[in-house]
Each structure stands twice: as structure tokens, then as C-alpha cells.
Amino acid sequence: MRKIFVKIRMNKTELQQLKKLQQQSTERSLSNYIRKLALQKPIIVRYRNQSADEFLAEMIRLKRELNAIGNNFNQVVHKLHILERIPEFRKWIMENKILQENLARKVGNIEQKMNEIHQQWLLK
């Protein structure tokens, strides 16, 4: 049990630098990080591939957008099916059913590939 306090003084810039270094490590608290530094114990530093992180973030945004587009498209098609009684709409719906199926398949393929890439990066 730790009962002794050790105080140090630093300016804001130094504290920010220290916190940044601590966040790059696996240490969750600043106290543990400083304790390990002071006692010269090993500190595990996480290595992050910045370009991979940026790519993954962009893919997650793209996935959300694709899901939203797919949902909107499905809602439009559902509303069009209500108008199926009108011959002009019925013809248009039948002609575009293949387009809808192709779009849904392609979005599904993209989503599956994005999930595969995400799983691979999680393992690294």
C-alpha cells in the first residue's frame, strides 16, 4: 500500500508532454507511468500505424454512408411498390429491380471486404 506522496512541479507544456507520452504507453494512469519512469521499470509503448488508422477511420465513415444510402434506397423502393398499381410505375419498378439487386449486392460486397480488412487490422 502506497502512503508516501512525492511532489514535483512542472509547467503546462511539460505536463502536456508527459501526458502525451503516457497516452502512447499501455499505462492507464499518469501516476503509474511516472512511478515506472522514476524506478526505471519497463514501459510498454504502443506502436500505431497512423496511415492505417486514418484509412480505417475513413472506411468506417464510408460504411456508415453506404448503410444510410442502402436504407434510403430501400425506403424509396418500398414506397414505389405502393404505386405499383399504376402501369407506368409498374414497368419502371420491374426494369429497375435488377439495378436494385445489383446495388444491394455491391454494397454487401464492399461491406464484407471492409469487415475483413478491419478484422485483419485488429489482429495486428
Image: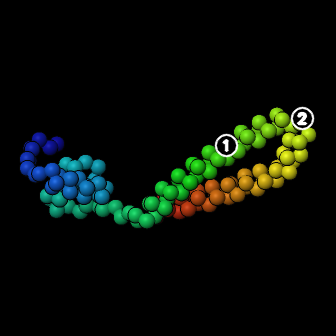
Q: Position of residue 49 (x, y in %)?
A: 41, 65
Q: Residue under circle 1?
A: 71
Q: From the viewer's perspective, is residue 64 above or below residue 84?
A: below
Percent across and percent down for residue 106 are 70, 57
Residue 123 visible (yes or no): no
Query: Split into 4 quadrants, where in the image is the N terminus?
Result: top left
Residue at the extreme front: 88
Circle 2 is placed at which residue position?
Answer: 85
Residue 30 in the image: state x and y as whole percent. Answer: 22, 49
Image position of 116 (left or right of 98): left
Residue at (14%, 43%) from the top-left corner?
Answer: 2
Q: Label 1 sits on what residue type?
A: Asn
Q: Residue at x 48, y 56 (%)?
A: 57
For the residues labelled 1 and 2, the Cα–Cα distance comes to: 24 Å
- Mark 1, Cα crowd under 10 Å, few <14 / some 14-19 / many 20+, is few
- Along the line of sight, the residue nearer the viewer: 49 or 106: 106
The quarter of the displayed image where residue 39 is located: bottom left
Q: Report x, y in % for residue 99.
A: 78, 54
Camera-nearest residue between 95 and 42:
95
Three-letter code for the amino acid on which mark 2 is drawn: Arg
Q: Residue at x 58, y 56 (%)?
A: 115
* 22 to 2, vertically: above or below: below
What element does badge 1 sit on?
Answer: helix
